[in-house]
Image (cartoon, rainbow, N blue to C red):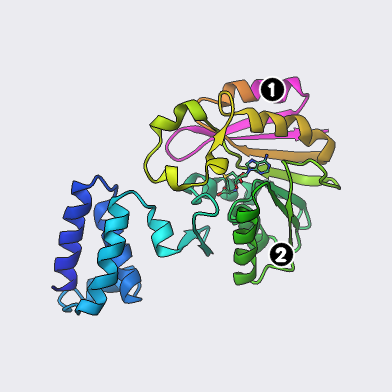
Amino acid sequence: MTVLEVLQSTTAYFKKHNVENPRLNAEHLLAHVLGRKRIDLYLEFEHALTESELAPLRDLVKRRSQGEPLQHLLGTVEFCGLTFLCDKRAMVPRPETEELVELLKSEIQNPESKIVDVGTGSGVIALSLAAKFPEAEILAVDISEDALALARENAARLSFADRIRFLKRNLLEDVEGSFDLIVANLPYVSTQDRHTLSREVLHDPAMAVFANGRGDELVRELIAQAPSRLSPGGVLALEIGIGQSDALFSVLAEKKYRDIYSKNDYSGVTRFLFAKYG
Ligand SMILES: C[S@@+](CC[C@H](N)C(=O)[O-])C[C@H]1O[C@@H](n2cnc3c(N)ncnc32)[C@H](O)[C@@H]1O
């Protein structure tokens, strides 16, 4: 079969198995197996594939059609222009979180800011900020040993291992010092909403997805903890779930934060909250 024929048949197979963006997925997997850039496939449509090239593709196509995330199959994910290792030890980073990082890049005025990323997962927020702000002092915490191991591997691959400290912590408990920015993309899905999630999301660690009650418990806990860890005028930046902004806005106001504002993500969902303290 030629490259084009394989792409067409894989796309049809993915469509039948309800894989979103079937053609794009087919291109990514074929490029991965061939060790090429996706765009290069377009120059090789007539190239005939050997059995040894097709065999590993079959396995990946089957796993993708059963709901395994593309990023797990590729082993990497692009985030804010950097390549991160990606596997089941931490959540697959989402495009919304890239938007959060972009917002933070304009929010951060002092290049030497002290920053803590709470619930760092694979480390994407902390490491993207480290790339943008080489003089910033960055701490990344997570409650999951597995996530921290992955984040440390990502830091080493990007040559930032000596620039970021990683700590296993429950939110900011026993975290010393004060910060100019506390950023967090914590779990925000209620366990009751499990049935609404895609097959792919169910491959993320449960600890990265679900929080108790209405889903915003951990965010509320962090809002309560943060004032004692923020430098005067420091910023708390949160990624939150659909429909959570009004209630969390009120909690921030009750806790005496100031300059509270929300931002929508590109799909129009109110997804980010920013607030200052002191
Ligand atoms: C939604 S994931 C976000 C991961 C990463 N920051 C990102 O944006 O892709 C939430 C992360 O919070 C961590 N987490 C859950 N409960 C926590 C807690 N009580 N304290 C610290 N981290 C926690 C999870 O292990 C997970 O890595």
Residue hosting label 1: 251
Relative to 163, residue 101 above or below: above
Which residue: 65% across, 32% down?
Answer: 219
Q: Earlier in the sequence, mark 2 or mark 1?
A: 2
The x, y position of residue 158, in whole percent, is: 61, 69
Which residue: 43% across, 58% down?
Answer: 72
- State whether label 2 is within 8 Å of ligand 1: no
Amino acid, disc 1: Val
Label 2: how many residues lie within 10 Å, few (<14), some (14-19) or many (20+)?
A: few
Query: Is 98 within the magenta?
Result: no
Observer-nearest residue: 220 or 73?
73
Report helix, strand or loop for mark 2: loop
Relative to 60, residue 207 above or below: above
Q: What label does residue 134 carry, if any?
A: 2
Span colored in magenta = 249-278
Which residue: 47% across, 48% down?
Answer: 95
For ligand 1, the image quadrant comes to top right
Asked if residue 232 can be seen in this view, the reply is no
Rounded to the nearest whole Å, what is the CA distance between mark 2 and mark 1?
34 Å
> Residue 21 vs residue 177: left or right?
left
Amino acid, disc 2: Pro
User: Where on the picture, by quarter, is residue 130?
Assistant: bottom right
Report helix, strand or loop for mark 1: helix
Query: Is 273 within the magenta?
Result: yes
User: Where on the picture, by quarter, is residue 46?
Assistant: bottom left
Label 1: how many residues lie within 10 Å, few (<14), some (14-19) or many (20+)?
A: some
Relative to 50, residue 207 above or below: above
Asked if residue 249 can be seen in this view, the reply is yes
